[in-house]
Amino acid sequence: MSKELIYMSFATQKGGAGKTPFTILAASWLHYKLGYNVAVIDCDYPQNSLAGNRKRDLDCMMKNEYYKKVAKEQFFAIEKKFYPVVGCDVQRALKWITSGADEVIDAAIEEMGFSDNLDVVLFDMPGTINQSEVDAETKKRRGVLSLVACMDYIFCPIRADRAAVDSSLLFIKAVQEQIINRRVGALQRFFLFWTEVDGREKTRVYDIVEKVASKFSFPILNTRIPYMLRFRKESLDTYDIFKSTLFPAKPSLAKDAKIDVFMEEICEKVNLKADLD
């Protein structure tokens, strides 16, 4: 297991970029497949869609004998409960990180039995980086970028269309100017990665973005995630498990979507072993 708790997030200000699906896929791969103890903090208030995903997953499992059987087999195989998913807002997440305590988040993590031995916490953030509020205790204005600054690692998904690229470049610029240049917070590394890639498509956007990323010294991951509809489907719609908060992606589906090599590359970047056997 890792020696220090890692905070990481899939973050960008472009809605529909896949932050929540990638958070689910990564959390489930790390927790169920690799054996790390994971918690997920869903800060995308008020919709908290990832927390909603967990509720739907649990409801579906309780109504389906097949998923009950899979859950039972998984529990006895890895001897671990489901990872906790906590819905909250940015201010509560910031309080938990900076003060080391929050009654709601702590209670949810403790209920699942991981309060003293977490390895990785993934944060699902809002898509609007200029969202901020005045903290009731400190009286300082804090928002999404304040939370980004508290992460150890940020992975920013980017699509090869003009609107998505423009939005992602604004996010990169904000992180560079307000966090990195000012040496604010704990952020160690910031990575970009291509998603919804059509292998038949040839576009100059890839070259343009990679030049900009190089200018800001933001590396781009080698793994390019292909365009696949299953990233947008509900997690337990079929017996082919992919995007689930209760189970890791089915190996064959993970391979098709390049999630297996994607997670291997992410583990390398955040200094986690990709194979604990």
Image (spheres, helix red, strand yellow):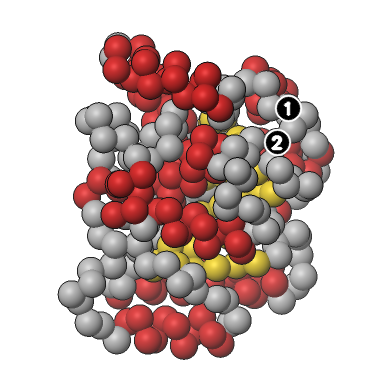
Left or right: 230, with 210 as reference point:
left
Residue 99 in the image: x percent, y percent? 81, 39
Residue 33 in the image: x percent, y percent? 50, 39
Residue beneath disc 2: 118
Say which amino acid is labelled 1.
Answer: Ser
Disc sitting over residue 115 in the figure: 1
Look at 42% across and 32% down and name the residue there: 247
Left or right: 267, with 237 as reference point:
right
Say which amino acid is labelled 2.
Answer: Leu
Q: Quadrant of residue 122?
A: top right
Residue 170 in the image: x percent, y percent? 48, 72
Look at 20% across and 76% down and name the residue there: 201
Mark 1 is surrounded, within 10 Å at the Cα level, by few (under 14), some (14 to 19) or many (20 or more) other residues, namely: some
Left or right: 245, with 81 as reference point:
left
Do the residues under discs 1 and 2 have CB atoms within 8 angstroms? yes
Look at 25% across and 60% down and name the residue there: 227
| Nearer-the-camera pick, 101 or 234 | 234
Left or right: 37, with 215 as reference point:
right
In the picture, the quarter occupied by the N terminus is: top right
Q: Quadrant of residue 36?
A: top right
Residue 202 in the image: x percent, y percent? 22, 82
With respect to residue 222, does 26 lie above or below?
above
- Secondary structure beneath disc 2? loop
| Nearer-the-camera pick, 110 or 119 | 119
Give the CA separation, mark 1 to mark 2: 7 Å
